[in-house]
Amino acid sequence: MMNALLSLNALNAMPEEAFLAAVGPVYERADWVAAAVAPQRPFASLTALHGAMHAVMASRPSAEVVQFLRGHPELSPGALPAGLTAHSSEEQRSTSLGTLDADTETRLVAANAAFSARFGFPFILAVRNASIATILAAINRRLGSSPEAERIEALREVQAISWMRLLGRVSPAATGVVSLHVLDTVRAGPAVGLPGALWFGDDRVASFTTDDKGRSGRLLDGQLRFGSYEWRLDTAAYFAATGLPTWDRSFLPSVQTRFTVWNPEEHYHVPVLLTPGSFVTYRGT
Amino acid sequence: MMNALLSLNALNAMPEEAFLAAVGPVYERADWVAAAVAPQRPFASLTALHGAMHAVMASRPSAEVVQFLRGHPELSPGALPAGLTAHSSEEQRSTSLGTLDADTETRLVAANAAFSARFGFPFILAVRNASIATILAAINRRLGSSPEAERIEALREVQAISWMRLLGRVSPAATGVVSLHVLDTVRAGPAVGLPGALWFGDDRVASFTTDDKGRSGRLLDGQLRFGSYEWRLDTAAYFAATGLPTWDRSFLPSVQTRFTVWNPEEHYHVPVLLTPGSFVTYRGT
Amino acid sequence: MMNALLSLNALNAMPEEAFLAAVGPVYERADWVAAAVAPQRPFASLTALHGAMHAVMASRPSAEVVQFLRGHPELSPGALPAGLTAHSSEEQRSTSLGTLDADTETRLVAANAAFSARFGFPFILAVRNASIATILAAINRRLGSSPEAERIEALREVQAISWMRLLGRVSPAATGVVSLHVLDTVRAGPAVGLPGALWFGDDRVASFTTDDKGRSGRLLDGQLRFGSYEWRLDTAAYFAATGLPTWDRSFLPSVQTRFTVWNPEEHYHVPVLLTPGSFVTYRGT
Amino acid sequence: MMNALLSLNALNAMPEEAFLAAVGPVYERADWVAAAVAPQRPFASLTALHGAMHAVMASRPSAEVVQFLRGHPELSPGALPAGLTAHSSEEQRSTSLGTLDADTETRLVAANAAFSARFGFPFILAVRNASIATILAAINRRLGSSPEAERIEALREVQAISWMRLLGRVSPAATGVVSLHVLDTVRAGPAVGLPGALWFGDDRVASFTTDDKGRSGRLLDGQLRFGSYEWRLDTAAYFAATGLPTWDRSFLPSVQTRFTVWNPEEHYHVPVLLTPGSFVTYRGT
């Protein structure tokens, strides 16, 4: 998976056989999904390609969907079983499934068995980087679902899994961007001149000072990647410029939050509402 | 300053001369402030001691206050000038004043000169760990104040400086504590069973799972320290347990925020309002 | 329905026949639900009684549930059809179903027909005071559900309908109360001395001034009623006391919000986070 | 004041004498302010005209400002004193100053006397529609200010008073507009298809349904008036369309908030963040 990414252009132009080799494994043991969308090329974006693939699967009768779901491996503790696809191996390795304590292993094995017995297919979760707490919480909740509800939810997980696999193979279109908009709700106006930065892991990938509308401008324009970003605002400098209402320092001397760029082809607009003692943030539009 | 901290009990019991040696330097070149409060001992808390010292200063006539303010050093760029008190040296060293570029040095020197000319005393800021952006923002704003307003603000800075100095000398009373309260505003109820942790710098200092009221319980009870804490909530595990409304992952897979414990004798109660696409946090009561 | 309410004590003490007469109609044409819980008396609260009745229904096999759902009338436009139960008549009269324009009537009739054809029982909605926009939005969304999902949702509506019917017949236990907690997130502390009031329709039912923790105290203690309340805060007076940062008046000179007391046996705790240019409110715990 | 409003065009074109008659009384007994700005005509907006008038006053030496402040009447309880200007009479009549109880009268008279004794000019407040709680809160806080701080604050009140007087005489430029933007923070996207309305007093002045970005569109374009508006959102219909997570109804079945249009020449952009159990609103940009 760590190979160089294909470009969308290359993917759109290649012979069908190469196309199947390139994106067939995105659906577990079901490259007929890729085959079904090959004639629809060219795709303008990964979002469009992924949407077309999901539409193929979503239009299948229930029995066929269940058959497909049965092709997935269990999320089993301990050593990886033989016969996993390359994608599944890599995904399971990104978790702590290999290093659970004995008690947790026992609970997970029991839950897996109960799940298969109830629904007739293994528990499927978009597991990349998931904590064991997340895995157990999900399987325990879903054990209580009806068969139909679980089939719907399993397909949603497949949607997530196939999206992440696709991003590991093909470069997204260069349409993504991040922008922040900081409001000072004490003054009921923009927070002007506030220094900030955007981080990706341990790297500072963008710096900015908010403009006279409180905006960061377009950051990482066309360079967005799947993963976890963090913005940090130097609110201490901002409040030094505007004055604080009390002698003790702000409760929030620097404000920062991680957010996930799930779709690097999208615009992530992030408003932040700021006071010395609180903040609000959300994904805007 | 890195010596072992005195206990409040010891401070309350010691002879006046030792008391003056212990806390006199908390007000810059003005141990008459400590002398004035020595007879009020015992103090039940650092908060009470600091409040008493501030009350002494705040009751002085303006001319005397200005005289006191004049005893402070400038926040000058480059090498530390001779004759600084030990506290002032340490505080200025905690900043980047020693390593500014030439242009910033020039701007700061000019601003300092303008400030002294206008107000008759140097620019005073509780400067520990302050960025140069914060320092410049503060001096530029305050250059526009009236003399009276600036005298008030300078005293507020002295209040902050003396508090931090006191915390470097005497242990706080063991009354401080942190608690989180997480609300799920989608379900209009507590976020139950959410795993979380509290960090201080690179150390995880407490772990918890929210109870059936969404509360973390009392964390670091009586062990709070001055400085920057960070809470982190494993919202991915929580939403795995409750179910997400959409197939793509939460915008906020893990929520975390730094906050300042300015007064380690207080209770820091921190509500968090959570949805898959937003959060709100503030210092509650 | 406008008769005097029974007390819980009376309900708990009466012969089974009278109990069935009193609460049997709460489930539409299904007083066997009341009969099944009669032996569980005494109930400490309406919440407990309603929970027991719902548990009876929820434990029935699907076919029996569908049979029960078929006993409900359609939400039909125009004049009320013959043969409605007293409850259903009253509920439909509380809407604008009787005075729709011709186009809306046609759409509703078509949606009802499509719904019955798809699911084998009529569209059921807890319709008291619902707008026609709400009714159409709900039926159109639910037409897209699977049969199983719709059966679950119809039962949820029955849960809501039976709760409102029960409240029309029996007095709730006197355990309900409202409290507000107002935080000033500019000062990161309680909003003290803020005048406020609680309204029910056109009546001011409680007045208060927030205490030194920003709290209203317990309002309407044991007197809560089902329905729509509104709190109003005189933020202009509060900001006059604390000072505003700008010369123009607050964006929010008086802050007010309606909220529903759905269960008058519960505690409605309502935090409000206030700044001159924003507010946040939610149901707390 | 209830006369027809002048247009900006007429004001810009009229002889100086008529201009002074038209806007001179906007500053209490100080039509020299209007005279000073007359040559700067034409003004493109009331905002510009008012800004120019304020700049004239703000540039005067302190002694002259105090002289001007002395020309204002007291906010005295009981019958209006003789000799008030028409504006002052009307403003005081809009309050409850004429109908206070004896105890409140006594407190206000004492506070007024203390104020004049301390500062040498009467207590000035932009009093239109202010509650007595607001009046008392403001005078009691400001009694604790320094003379300089109070002079600054009194001028800010004059700024507010003159703005409201100007709006009573001249029509604003037709540049104002209201827009709402509703975000569903559960789904991390726009709240689409949500019905809403805008009210002014008892009149519904605009209706809308949010578009596919959650926006109301431009409301009251060029028709904005000074005063208190209220938006109301039919969140019950919205949640009926999207589905609620729980069987009981939303805590917030209809969301509504009043806001002040202080400057009818501006754009009031109002974001609302919505969940079934909470909402956030603020003045955006």
Image (spheres, coloured by chain):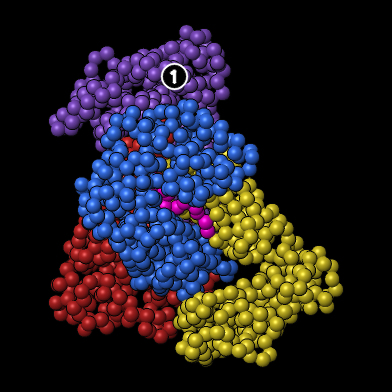
Chain colours: A yellow, B blue, C red, D purple
Camera sees residue A229: yes
Which of the two residues, D245 or C117, is positioned nearer the viewer here? Answer: D245
User: Observer-nearest residue: B5 or C259?
Assistant: B5
For the N terminus of chain A, the image quarter is: bottom right
| Left or right of residue C38, residue D193 in this image | right
Q: Nearer the viewer, residue D124 or B161?
A: B161
Specify whether residue C192 is painted magenta.
no
Q: Chain of mark 1?
A: D
Quadrant of residue A5 in the image?
bottom right
Q: Which residue is mark 1?
A: D57
Give the amino acid at mark 1.
Met
Residue D282 on image: x %, y %:
46, 46
Which residue does the image show at 50% across and 50% down from the upper left? B94
Label 1: which secondary element: helix
Question: For residue C193, which quarter of the picture?
Answer: top left
Count up the numbered dots: 1
Q: Is residue C280 above or below residue D260?
A: below
Viewer-proximal residue, C220 or B229?
B229
> Label 1: few (<14), some or many (≥20) within 10 Å?
many
The stretch in magenta equals A247-257
**Left or right placement of residue A118 versus residue B60 in this view:** right
Give percent across and percent down for residue D6: 48, 19
Task: Give the percent coordinates (x, y) of residue A255.
Answer: 50, 54
Q: Residue at x 15, y 77 (%)?
A: C14
Secondary structure mainly formed by the magenta segment: loop
Residue C149 visible in the displayed image: no
Q: Is residue A248 located in the magenta-colored stretch of the structure? A: yes
